[in-house]
C-alpha cells in the first residue's frame, strides 16, 4: 500500500469523493451539538462553528492539536489545503516525506500526526472537498470532507436516509466515518463502510482513479475501514 519509490513512511492514497447508498421514504434530523469555546487551536472544535481552524491568543507555537487540544498533530506551516483534485494529486506526486490527512481530528493522534521538526512532512486538509456532488437514483456522491450531519440533512431534504446506523458524533467527516468503520447501535444495521458503492482516490503515483465493487486492481474493500493507512 506504500510507494516504494519514495520514503517508506508516506501514506498517500487519498479519498476525494464517495458514493454511498441510501434508502427512501424516511427523514432523519442531524445531531445537535452545543456551542463551546476552545482555548487553543483545534482541528475543529466540538461545536457548530464553521471555522476549520480557530486561533486564539493563548497559542504561541502555531501547533495544530487534535479535538481534545492535548495531542500535537502538526505545525501550521505544515498544513496544506488543496482546492481541487489536481492540486491534491500534485501534492501526492511530489511528496518527499510523510503525508497524512486530517478531518475533524477525532482519530487516534498516531494515525494523523506528522513530525513537527520535518518541514517536508505535510498535513493535508480536505476542507475544500465538500457538499453533494450528484444525486442518483439509488446513490448519492459527496465530497470526502462533508460532515455526517450535513450528509444526513441533505439526504433528508431529498426524502432519503442512510441505510446504516449513524454514530453519535455528527461533525465527523464522511471519509473519516467510512475509514474508521463508524457505526451506531443495532445488530441489523451496518457501519458506514458497508454502504460505500464507489470511491474516487488519488494513488501514490498521483493518478486519480475511480474504484467500485467490480474493480480488480484496487479492491474497494481495501479502501474502506483502512484506519487512515490509505
Image (spheres, rainbow, N blue to C red):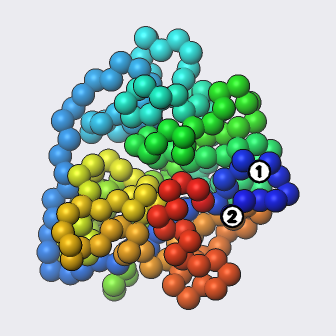
Q: Is residue 118 left or right of residue 227?
A: right
Pick the quarter of the image with the C terminus: bottom right
Q: In this view, does 76 lie above or below 85?
A: above
Q: Where is residue 79 in the image (x, y as percent from the top left)?
A: 61, 35
Q: How crowded is mark 2: few (under 14 residues within 10 Å), some or many (20 or more)?
A: few
Q: Mark 2 points at which residue?
A: 1
Q: Position of residue 74 (x, y in %)?
A: 58, 31
- Which residue is outermost to the right? 5
Query: Is tag 1's residue or tag 2's residue first in the polypeptide sequence?
Result: 2
Q: Is residue 199 left or right of residue 168?
A: right
Q: In this view, does 43 lie above or below 133?
A: above
Q: Where is residue 20 in the image (x, y as percent from the top left)?
A: 39, 74
User: Residue drawn at (63%, 36%), measured in percent from left and top?
Assistant: 114
Q: Mark 1 points at which residue?
A: 8
Where residue 38 sits, quadrant-wise, is top left
User: Residue drawn at (34%, 86%), measured in percent from left and top?
Assistant: 137
User: Residue drawn at (70%, 44%), measured in percent from left and top?
Assistant: 98
Q: How crowded is mark 1: few (under 14 residues within 10 Å), some or many (20 or more)?
A: few
- Which residue is outermost to the front? 187
Helix, strand, or loop for circle 1?
loop
Answer whether residue 86 is visible to the viewer in this image.
no
Q: Is residue 159 left or right of residue 183?
A: left
Answer whether residue 39 is visible to the viewer in this image.
yes
Q: Distance between the residues labelled 1 and 2?
A: 10 Å
Where residue 194 sits, quadrant-wise, is bottom left
Q: Where is residue 3 in the image (x, y as percent from the top left)?
A: 77, 59
Helix, strand, or loop for circle 2?
loop
Marks 1 and 2 close (CB-CB < 8 Å): no
Amino acid at each position: 500500500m506504500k510507494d516504494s519509490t519514495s520514503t517508506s513512511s508516506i501514506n498517500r492514497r487519498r479519498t476525494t469523493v464517495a458514493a454511498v447508498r441510501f434508502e427512501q421514504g424516511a427523514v432523519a434530523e442531524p445531531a445537535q451539538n452545543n456551542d463551546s469555546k476552545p482555548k487553543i487551536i483545534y482541528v475543529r472544535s466540538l461545536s457548530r462553528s464553521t471555522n476549520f481552524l480557530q486561533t486564539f491568543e493563548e497559542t504561541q507555537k502555531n501547533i495544530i492539536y487534535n479535538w481534545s487540544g492535548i495531542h500535537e498533530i502538526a505545525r501550521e506551516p505544515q498544513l496544506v489545503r488543496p482546492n481541487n483534485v489536481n492540486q491534491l494529486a500534485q501534492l501526492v506526486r511530489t511528496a518527499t516525506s510523510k503525508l497524512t490527512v486530517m478531518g475533524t481530528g477525532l482519530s487516534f493522534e498516531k494515525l494523523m500526526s506528522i513530525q513537527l521538526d520535518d518541514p517536508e512532512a505535510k498535513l493535508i486538509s480536505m476542507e475544500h472537498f465538500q457538499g453533494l456532488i450528484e444525486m442518483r437514483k439509488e446513490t448519492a456522491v459527496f465530497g470526502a470532507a462533508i460532515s455526517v450531519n450535513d450528509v444526513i440533512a441533505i439526504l433528508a431534504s431529498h426524502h432519503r436516509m442512510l441505510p446504516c446506523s449513524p454514530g453519535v458524533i455528527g461533525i465527523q467527516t464522511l471519509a473519516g466515518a467510512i475509514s474508521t468503520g463508524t457505526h451506531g447501535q443495532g445488530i441489523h444495521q451496518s457501519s458506514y463502510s458497508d454502504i460505500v458503492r464507489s470511491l474516487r482516490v488519488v494513488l501514490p503515483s498521483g493518478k486519480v482513479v475511480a474504484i467500485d465493487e467490480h474493480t480488480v486492481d484496487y479492491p474497494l474493500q481495501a479502501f474502506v475501514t483502512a484506519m487512515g493507512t490509505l
